[in-house]
Image (spheres, rainbow, N blue to C red):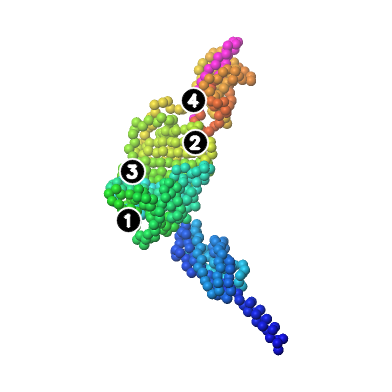
């Protein structure tokens, strides 16, 4: 009998040990916010339970979105206990997502079970269209301004500023919004001398990021107070009594920032949030919107600017890009002085004139101005590469000529001679035809001195004084009176480097070394040449 009892006890102990295991299960207990928008930080709270009779140590809890792991954390549970675990995730776009929460996915500490995994479907809403002035006071305004930058504008500004060690000036903002769809910046000056400023970011920006941004831009430390105002959770950022408080909150896919200053009272953004009538300010900007116009060539819009200044002048601007460059225009509707002086060159097309500032050695920007009726227009182009091109420069002219506004065309005036295409040489030499292309001057030259001359040297250069020996020809050219010879030689800048065909306007000096046939006396003459490509 004793022989039977001992094996029985061993079996009981063995099965007892095998039965002492953890039993894990998981469930999603809450999702906040309940109706999320793209860019919102969504918090998933899961409840993990160990209903077994053994400890479960260092097992994993995972959250997956569309089969991609968002976060994994380690948890330990004693028998009969439970624990809540929170995960945060920010959707960058709207849509339906499959959410899965798993516990001990590798079955390391417990047996496989259907209870170790749970799932749900989550709908993320797209950000709603928002009025930038929907969070400012409704009262008499004298100056309204709105900048509206889209996703392409943010990416372009960041991409072409990023090679610098630090993004300059306002581009600091792009460190925080580069993944966003757009940014709206609005300012309002009121008749009672109060002011309101608005910043709206369409994307995954958070209150914490905005606090860091303001600190970086103002070199101040902000304290955060969370308040409920008109049913909305709002963070009020303050940096001491000398600085204006700033209200920041997320709503319908946007991060909203609002600051307000009123000299006559101590009202701040906290007192005014939710008290607005957006139609009032939008109505004021309708006239500015009428100045918007498409470009005469294919380009992607990056953003726009609208302004109504002192209730008398409407302004509109827009920026664009294509593969080769950046472009833009600015239109102001106001009385124009008819005696405006253009101190650069005047370009004519049909009966229209524009004033063009050409790129310089220190700048790649081409700026064009045009007056028509009561409208002032400024257009610009700048290449993305580190050198100018005629194609990019010409597009600035194309923009200003394409904008069509009613009124009498104003004629530009200048004090200096207008830069035109010309080719001038003294001594009875003249240019039959000429052009500058592929880095070379192509000149058909004639002379009517009544005698045959021998051309010993020729040079096209910006240098002010060229010794004869520097431009001797390999073989002299005999040119009879009233006959023509074709010359094709490279042109050089003031430092002696070859000049390239970069701009729509090209100007240089020409040096000609010649002698009368039968004479050994060399004569050097200097002429001027300019070429207009457009």
Please say whether residue 37 is one of the residues in the magenta stretch. no
Residue pointed to by mark 2:
364
Label 1's element?
Answer: helix
Whether residue 105 sits left or right of residue 134 in the image: it is right
Q: CA distance from mark 2 to mark 3?
A: 31 Å
- Residue for point 33% across, 34% down: 337
The foreground one among 154 and 301 is 154
What is the secondary structure assignment of the residue under circle 2?
loop
Residue 350 seen anywhere in this rendered image of the structure: no
Say above or below: 34 vs 194. below
Q: Is residue 313 left or right of residue 67?
A: left
The dot on residue 376 is none
- Which stretch is magenta? 512-532
- Which callout, 1 or 4, points to the residue nearer the camera? 1
Marks 4 and 3, how far apart in space? 44 Å
Residue identifier under label 1: 271
**Earlier residue among tags 4 and 3:** 3
Instruction: Please identify the dominant SS of the magenta region.
Output: strand
Q: Tell me the tag on residue 422.
A: 4
Q: Quadrant of residue 53?
A: bottom right
Q: CA distance from mark 1 to mark 4?
A: 68 Å
Q: CA distance from mark 1 to mark 3?
A: 27 Å
């Amino acid at each position: 009998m004793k022989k039977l009892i001992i094996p029985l006890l061993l079996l009981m102990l063995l099965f007892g040990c095998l039965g002492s295991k953890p039993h894990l299960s998981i469930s999603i207990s809450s999702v906040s916010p309940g109706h999320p928008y793209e860019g919102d930080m969504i918090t998933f709270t899961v409840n993990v339970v160990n209903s077994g009779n053994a400890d479960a140590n260092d097992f994993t809890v995972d959250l997956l979105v569309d089969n991609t792991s968002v976060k994994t954390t380690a948890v330990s549970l004693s028998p009969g206990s439970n624990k809540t675990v929170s995960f945060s995730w920010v959707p960058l776009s709207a849509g339906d997502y499959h959410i899965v929460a798993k516990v001990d996915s590798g079955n390391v500490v417990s047996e496989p079970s259907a209870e170790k995994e749970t799932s749900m479907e989550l709908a993320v809403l797209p950000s709603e269209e928002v009025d930038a002035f929907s969070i400012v006071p409704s009262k008499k305004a004298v100056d309204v301004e709105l900048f509206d930058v889209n996703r392409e504008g943010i990416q372009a500004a960041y991409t072409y500023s990023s090679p610098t060690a630090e993004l300059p000036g306002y581009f600091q903002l792009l460190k925080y919004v580069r993944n966003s769809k757009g940014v709206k910046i609005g300012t309002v000056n009121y008749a009672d001398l109060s002011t309101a400023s608005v910043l709206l970011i369409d994307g995954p920006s958070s209150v914490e990021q905005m606090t860091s941004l303001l600190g970086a831009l103002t070199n101040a430390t902000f304290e955060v107070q969370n308040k409920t105002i008109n049913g909305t959770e709002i963070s009020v950022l303050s940096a001491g009594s000398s600085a204006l408080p700033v209200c920041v909150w997320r709503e319908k896919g946007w991060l909203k920032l609002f600051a307000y200053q009123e000299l006559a009272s101590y009202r701040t953004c906290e007192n005014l949030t939710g008290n607005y009538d957006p139609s009032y300010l939008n109505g004021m900007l309708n006239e500015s919107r009428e100045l918007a116009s498409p470009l005469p060539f294919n380009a992607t819009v990056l953003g726009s600017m609208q302004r109504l200044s002192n209730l008398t002048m409407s302004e509109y601007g827009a920026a664009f890009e294509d593969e080769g460059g950046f472009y833009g225009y600015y239109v102001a509707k106001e009385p124009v002085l008819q005696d405006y002086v253009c101190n650069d060159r005047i370009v004519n097309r049909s009966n229209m004139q524009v004033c063009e500032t050409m790129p310089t050695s220190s700048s790649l920007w081409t700026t064009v101005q045009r007056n028509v009726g009561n409208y002032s227009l400024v257009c610009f182009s700048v290449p993305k590469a580190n050198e100018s091109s005629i194609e990019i420069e010409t597009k600035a002219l194309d923009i200003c000529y394409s904008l069509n506004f009613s009124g009498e065309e104003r004629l530009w005036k200048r004090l200096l001679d207008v830069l035109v295409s010309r080719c001038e040489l003294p001594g009875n030499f003249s240019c039959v035809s000429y052009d500058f292309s592929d880095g070379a001057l192509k000149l058909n030259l004639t002379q009517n001195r009544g005698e045959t001359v021998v051309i010993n040297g020729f040079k096209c250069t910006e240098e002010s004084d060229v010794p004869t020996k520097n431009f001797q020809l390999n073989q002299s050219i005999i040119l009879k009176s009233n006959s023509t010879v074709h010359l094709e030689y490279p042109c050089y800048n003031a430092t002696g480097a070859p000049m390239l065909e970069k701009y729509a306007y090209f100007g240089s000096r020409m040096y000609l070394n010649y002698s009368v046939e039968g004479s050994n006396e060399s004569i050097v003459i200097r002429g001027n040449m300019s070429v207009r490509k457009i």
